[in-house]
């Protein structure tokens, strides 16, 4: 979405490029940024790239994935519920906790579901195959 440096990719350019991708039937834009130039100064903080996903979604009319220091279930839930993005993409948080989706569902008072082949591993949980439910 941006290179965070003068002369690098800007959000406006990313929007124009996203329009071209939409015209080619691309389904989803992963709205990440930076990491390519040692001169960059990235204002890192919780959800610092979510605004990119929101803007692309609104201005281009294409599904977006939000990234960037999304660490809590409530934060991810809010991003989806408020329409800032269509999906939340996790990276480092899943490396820290591979069971994050299950823990997030529980924190949000949802019942996690399991693929059939994993149901035995979740013996202490209800046998459910439908998506998360409230």
Image (cartoon, helix red, strand yellow):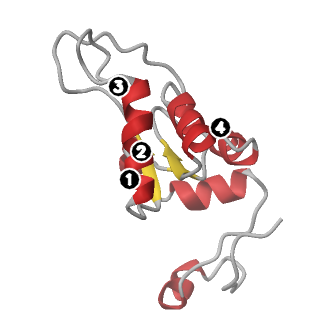
The residue singled out by tag 2 in the image is 18
> Mark 1 vs mark 4: which is more N-terminal?
1
> Mark 4 vs mark 2: which is more N-terminal?
2
Q: Residue at x 70, y 82 (%)?
A: 130
Decide if residue 79 is in sight here.
Answer: yes
The residue singled out by tag 1 in the image is 21
The residue singled out by tag 4 in the image is 75
Disc 3 secondary structure class: loop
The residue singled out by tag 3 in the image is 2
Q: Residue at x 71, y 70 (%)?
A: 132
Q: Position of residue 91 (x, y in %)?
A: 38, 46
Q: Residue at x 83, y 65 (%)?
A: 134
Q: Position of residue 115 (x, y in %)?
A: 53, 84
Looking at the image, is mark 3 or mark 1 nearer the viewer?
1
Q: Residue at x 65, y 37 (%)?
A: 75
Determine whether label 3 and label 4 are within 8 Å by CB: no
């Amino acid at each position: 979405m941006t290179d965070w440096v003068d002369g690098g990719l800007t959000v406006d350019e990313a929007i124009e490029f996203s329009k071209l991708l939409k015209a080619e039937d691309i389904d989803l834009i992963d709205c990440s940024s930076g990491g390519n130039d040692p001169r960059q100064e990235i204002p890192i903080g919780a959800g610092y790239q979510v605004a990119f996903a929101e803007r692309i979604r609104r201005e281009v009319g294409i599904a977006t994935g939000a990234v960037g220091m999304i660490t809590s279930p409530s934060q991810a839930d809010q991003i989806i519920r408020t329409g800032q993005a269509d999906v939340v993409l996790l990276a480092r948080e899943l490396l820290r906790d591979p069971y994050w989706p299950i823990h997030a569902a529980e924190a949000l008072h949802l019942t996690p579901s399991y693929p059939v082949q994993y149901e035995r591993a979740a013996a202490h949980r209800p046998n459910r195959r439908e998506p998360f439910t409230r």
